[in-house]
Amino acid sequence: MAELVRLEKVEEGPLAQINALLRQLSERVPPCTPELLRSIVESPTLELWVAKENGVIVGMGELVIALKPEGVIAQIEDIVVDEAHRGKGFGKMLSEKLIERARIRGARVVQLSSRPSRTAANVLYKKLGFKQHETNSYYLEL
């Protein structure tokens, strides 16, 4: 049975499952530490949601809330579903939950980015009403 839950405590099992998902998202992503996960679950501006099947985390996504001069902005980050569980609707469930939480938190817009190679994810985001806009995406390693 599938369920969505907000991660609210740090435990070794879920941390290992989250790190396995992060490796599927990108090889460049360093593993999450217990200290970092603790900061995440205690953060008032970040929500980490996981999809579970039979008690095992099979997907995850984050909602980041930012208060900016133009209002509350929500950013969806790191939606990933385990390769063995893709095509079962977990990505849609997570996306819809994060959008719902953004509304509840008062966001006026939800933003996300996704690599073009993540074809199924990009199709899903468009079905959910996201509009692609012309922009360059940059990052700087520190």
Image (cartoon, rainbow, N blue to C red):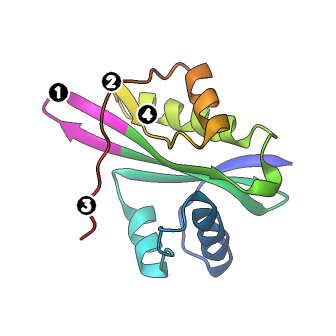
Q: Nearer the viewer, mark 3 or mark 2?
A: 3
Residue 138, position as x, y percentages in the image = 29, 49
- Numbered mark located on residue 70 in the image: 1
Disc with the residue nearer the chain's start (3 vs 1)? 1
Q: Residue under circle 4?
A: 102
Q: Determine which quarter of the picture holds residue 132.
A: top left
Q: Determine which quarter of the picture holds residue 94.
A: top right
Residue 4, position as x, y percentages in the image = 68, 47
Q: Nearer the viewer, mark 3 or mark 4?
A: 3
Residue 38, position as x, y percentages in the image = 44, 72
Is residue 110 among the parts visible in the rendering?
yes
Residues at marks 3 and 4, CA–CA distance in whole angstroms? 27 Å
Q: Residue under circle 2?
A: 108
- Numbered mark located on residue 140 in the image: 3
- Secondary element under disc 2, as helix, strand or loop, is loop
Magenta segment, principal secondary structure? Answer: strand
Label 4 Cα neighbours within 10 Å, binned few <14 / some 14-19 / many ≥20 = many
- Numbered mark located on residue 52 in the image: none
Q: Is residue 58 above or below residue 92?
A: below
Q: Is residue 86 magenta?
A: no
Disc with the residue nearer the chain's start (1 vs 4)? 1
- Report the span colored magenta: 65-74
Whether the residues at callouts 1 and 2 have beta carbons within 8 Å, the answer is: yes
Amino acid type shown at disc 3: Leu
Name the residue rendered at 39%, 52% in the picture.
46
Amino acid type shown at disc 4: Ala
Whether the residues at callouts 3 and 4 have beta carbons within 8 Å, the answer is: no
- Secondary element under disc 1, as helix, strand or loop, is loop
Label 3 Cα neighbours within 10 Å, binned few <14 / some 14-19 / many ≥20 = few
- Secondary element under disc 3, as helix, strand or loop, is loop
Amino acid type shown at disc 1: Glu
Q: Nearer the viewer, mark 3 or mark 1?
A: 3
